[in-house]
Image (cartoon, rainbow, N blue to C red):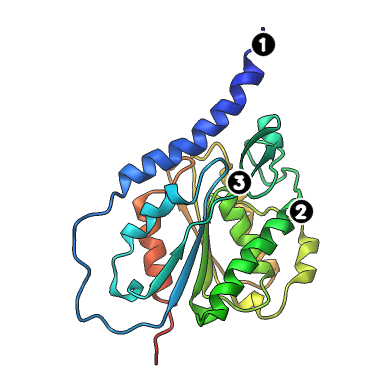
């Protein structure tokens, strides 16, 4: 009996869920009270997109690290991907924003743009709803890990308005350069923060490194940060850097 084909999907799931378990323990919310007498800030919105096989609620502890008073009026959203067959897991059904054809992901991995664009439309609908509710697009930030990071990149690049920013963690470029023909001049003004672990064996570091040059050719700005010894996960250093990065871009009421 061949065990390897049966075990491999389980191992991939173990990698994705293992990140969540480690992460929840890493950033358990403290009992510290939020700062008082903070400067009034305009409403802001942070949308977090999880990785393959994960869920939105499992990532909610992330917001526990954002303790600065600037986030007092921030609305967070942690949606969950629909369950669907995933090619790299031999067709196993799991939470997935779009299909992934192979693991590890490299800079030359196959790209399924049709499935990706369906997911982008759903993300855009979430952003549209928040902007219609009164949030300034400049105070909208889309962030994501792994598959969610790849979706973050596509969603921000193809959104018709300038957003506050997009943050990609351990992600990759999930489309070909031709997709940029759909990009608006306003979208080119949205800044990108890209963080990637140099010891990542699931989404290879080379896949992350390919991001900034791609974005530069598209006329966009990208801040890239490499983290030595970090595997396919997120650490506190990355998230505290994200907090600072967003703080400098939040628009005040004035």
The residues tagged by marks 1 and 3 sit, at their Cα atoms, a distance apart of 32 Å
Helix, strand or loop at mark 3 = helix
Q: Which residue is mark 1?
A: 2
Q: Nearer the viewer, mark 1 or mark 3?
A: 1
The residue most toward the top is 1
- Of labels 3 and 2, earlier in sequence is 2
- Of labels 1 and 2, earlier in sequence is 1
- Determine whether 149 is above or below 7 in the image: below
- Density class for disc 3 (Cα within 10 Å; few <14, some 14-19, many ≥20) is some
Q: Position of residue 88 (x, y in %)?
A: 68, 34
- Determine whether 133 is above or below 155 in the image: below
Helix, strand or loop at mark 2 = helix
- Determine whether 140 is above or below 84 in the image: below
**Foreground residue among 196 and 132:** 132
- Density class for disc 1 (Cα within 10 Å; few <14, some 14-19, many ≥20) is few
- Density class for disc 2 (Cα within 10 Å; few <14, some 14-19, many ≥20) is some
Helix, strand or loop at mark 1 = loop
The residue most toward the bottom is 254
Whether residues under marks 3 and 2 lie with C-beta atoms below 8 angstroms apart, the answer is: no
Q: Is residue 176 left or right of residue 219?
A: right
Whether residues under marks 1 and 2 lie with C-beta atoms below 8 angstroms apart, the answer is: no
Q: Which residue is mark 3?
A: 206
Q: Which mark is residue 113?
A: 2
Q: Nearer the viewer, mark 3 or mark 2?
A: 2
- Residue 114, visible in the rendered structure: yes
């Amino acid at each position: 009996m061949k065990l390897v084909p049966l075990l491999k999907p389980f191992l991939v799931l173990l990698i994705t869920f293992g990140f969540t378990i480690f992460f929840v323990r890493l950033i358990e919310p403290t009992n510290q009270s939020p700062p008082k007498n903070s400067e009034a800030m305009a409403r802001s919105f942070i949308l977090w997109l999880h990785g393959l096989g994960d869920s939105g609620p499992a990532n909610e502890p992330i917001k526990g690290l954002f303790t600065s008073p600037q986030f007092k009026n921030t609305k967070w959203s942690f949606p969950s991907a629909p369950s669907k067959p995933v090619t790299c897991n031999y067709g196993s059904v799991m939470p997935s924003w779009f299909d992934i054809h192979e693991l590890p992901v490299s800079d030359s991995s196959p790209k399924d743009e049709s499935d990706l664009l369906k997911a982008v439309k759903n993300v855009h609908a979430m952003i549209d709803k928040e902007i219609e509710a009164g949030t300034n697009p400049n105070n909208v930030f889309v962030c994501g890990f792994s598959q969610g990071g790849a979706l973050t990149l596509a969603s921000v690049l193809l959104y018709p308005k300038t957003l506050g920013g997009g943050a990609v963690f351990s992600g990759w470029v999930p489309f070909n350069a031709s997709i940029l023909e759909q990009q608006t001049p306003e979208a080119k003004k949205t800044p990108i923060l890209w963080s990637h672990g140099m010891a990542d064996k699931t989404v290879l570091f080379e896949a992350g490194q390919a991001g900034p040059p791609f974005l530069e050719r598209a006329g966009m700005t990208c801040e890239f940060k490499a983290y030595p010894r970090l595997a396919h996960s997120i650490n506190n250093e990355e998230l505290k850097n994200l907090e600072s990065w967003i703080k400098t871009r939040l628009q005040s009421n004035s």
